[in-house]
Amino acid sequence: MPDNLQSETLPMADLERNRNRAAIRRAPESAALLAFLVAEIIFFSLSSPYFLTWGNWVNVFTALSITGVLAAGGTMLLIAGQFDLSVGSGVAFVALVLALTIDSLGVLPASVLAMLVGVGIGLINGFLVTRIGVNALITTLGTLAIFRGLTQSIGGGRNIPIANFDWAIWRPFLNIPLSALVFLLVAIMVGIVLKRSVFGRSIYAIGANENAARLVGIRTKGVVFAGFLLSGAFIGLGGLISASQLGSTSGTTGLGLELAVVTAVILGGTSLKGGTGTMLGTVIGLLIVGVLNNGLTLMNVNSSWQQAATGLLLILAVSFDQLRQRLVGRR
């Protein structure tokens, strides 16, 4: 076999082995996640007669809609070994742009502009990471601070009402709000893209071994840049959902969304080191957090304790991910 052909087939073989090994690792993990979710459901159903009602489950998915849309982008990026911690401040800035332009431009033009602002945030992040070479964590921490500061400065720290923009609370099907349906549609689409498209396979390859992915002809910088653009688009969509659900925006809009997204994605089995993860796992992670918060609310547990419980879940998820990486490294 010629040397150049052998050098190209070896990285492809490495990628295939990484994918097979990842599938083996995810199987018991997914079962454990589902078991934990079922245990939560059983516990809270025994604690509150309202928990298993259709109306309450609609509330769970509605509450998860913004975080879920953002987590779709977060899943793609983390599989590729990247981060986006600017999502919360990005949502706030997008909602502010909508609030300031909707009266003068009209609903549709203002919505399009707000979406483009979200994509622009992703473009800035992607450019800094892929073209300038700044670490994604540092980049998105910086843009988090920039857009939070801009939102508070331009908005003056006041609550700005947004009239005639209530599409997210429409209930067109089975009494389910449109925002929840949008979240489910986004989750399905991203799941299909990750599993069935060349772009999705490239994301997994980059996260597993970026150098090997480059050797087999994957344009790694272009794929990562596209991932940040998609994350920006989901920031735009999340900002529109937030503005519609709340009917207003302020300097504190979206606070804590970064933590919620990272918790759900990591809890769902996406590795901090990249290369593994699924959108289905992220949805399960979202449900674990959402069911926990909903159940504790029904039990009249203080919201501060709910935040503490979410933080504990994040620590456990990261600890489990590190333990899994060590076990795999020993094989």
Image (cartoon, rainbow, N blue to C red):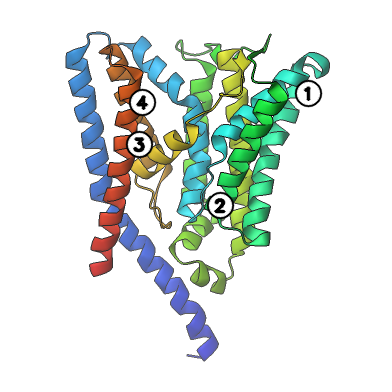
Q: Give the residue type at disc 3.
A: Gly
CB-based contact (under 8 Å), mark 4 and mark 3? no
Left or right of 101 in this view: 51: left
Cα separation between marks 1 and 4: 33 Å
| Frontmost residue, 126 versus 276 | 126
Residue 192: x and y, percent?
49, 43
Q: Of discs 1 and 4, which sits in the foreground?
A: 4
CB-based contact (under 8 Å), mark 1 and mark 4? no
Residue 264: x and y, percent?
39, 37
Q: Say which residue label 1 marks.
A: 109
Left or right of 211 in this view: 116: right
- Say which mark, if any, is on residue 290: 4
Q: Say which residue label 3 marks.
A: 285
| Frontmost residue, 271 versus 186 | 271
Q: Of discs 4 and 2, which sits in the foreground?
A: 2
Q: Earlier in the sequence, mark 3 or mark 1?
A: 1
Q: Give the residue type at disc 4.
A: Gly
